[in-house]
Amino acid sequence: MANADLRPMTIGEVLDRTFRLYKSEFWLFAGIMSLPFFVLFIFNVSIGWLTRAQVARIGASHAPAPISPTMIAATIGGGLLVIILALILSSIGQAATIFAVSDLYLGRRASIRGSFGQVRGHIFQVMGVIFLTGLLVGVGFILLIIPGIMFACRVGVAVPAAMLEDKGPSTAISRSMELTKGFAMQIFLIFVLTWVLAIIAGVILQLPFTLMAATPRPHVLPFGLVMLQYVTGFISQVLVAPVGAIAFSLMYYNLRVRKEAFDLEHLMGALGPGPSPSGTAAGTVLPA
């Protein structure tokens, strides 16, 4: 994508361009997502290794293990730590992908290092947007499912707005609500696409290991099998996660082109201040 191709697109064109960009820049996007998810992979492997002894003891005793307050606190604390770490790392990967898509969309070169460099200073910003949108969408689902889905669609481009316009969480959400007005169904189709891809990847790569572990009595899987389970989970995350980030980034720019003539704005900015029609520089006073 050496030259910027700024034009209004249908949802079909957005998705087509998403997959073309994903295919042509696969190693860029896979490299961006692999770094944060590899940290999460190492953390999950460590947690899995530490819990093996406890599960083995329960399986060998053939008796229910006493549940102590310490065990409950450790389980809850470990779960919260995983959630927080996953939020931080996925936020960093998503933000870096958005910056990479933006560079490619606007005809600039993109790199893994450059994309992560642009995330610097925006980590808490993107985490705030993801947390706040997740909280609001969750409340919408609890109250009534349909409003939750509708709200999720309206805030679909909040993260790109926050990153590319340097806005805070609440402002980015308002910005997304403004841009997606009248386009909620198209955002919904992007969500459906990413969900379907995640399910397919999970079924193909992880379902066999899940079925092996799903027995009535606690038992210990061979560590090699556990490692394969973690590896396939890591691969599915790296393969699927960029698709949604690319699609929502392209949709963000598509909405700006449609509603704000961003294509003309970008063109004028690229051209810079040009000469006046008479051939003199703008602002020059001609002699009398």
Image (spheres, rainbow, N blue to C red):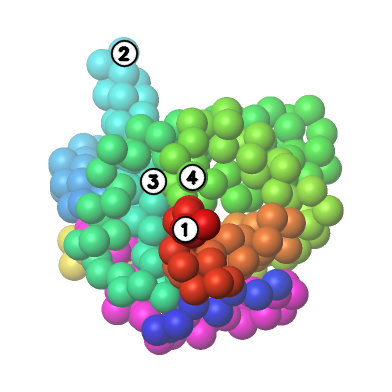
Magenta stretch mostly in which secondary structure? helix
Tag of residue 165: 4
Vertical placement of 183 versus 110: above or below?
A: above
Specify the quadrant of the image occupied by residue 16.
bottom right
Q: Quadrant of the N terminus?
A: bottom left
Camera-nearest residue between 20 and 254: 254
- Mark 1 vs 2, N-terminal side: 2
- Foreground label between 1 and 2: 1
Identified by mark 3, the residue type is Ser
Identified by mark 1, the residue type is Pro
Does residue 121 appear in the picture of this structure?
A: yes
Q: Residue at x 40, y 34 (%)?
A: 125
Residue span colored magenta: 9-38
- Mark 3 vs 1, N-terminal side: 3
Q: Which residue is mark 2?
A: 69
Vertical placement of 117 versus 143: above or below?
A: below
Q: Which residue is mark 1?
A: 287
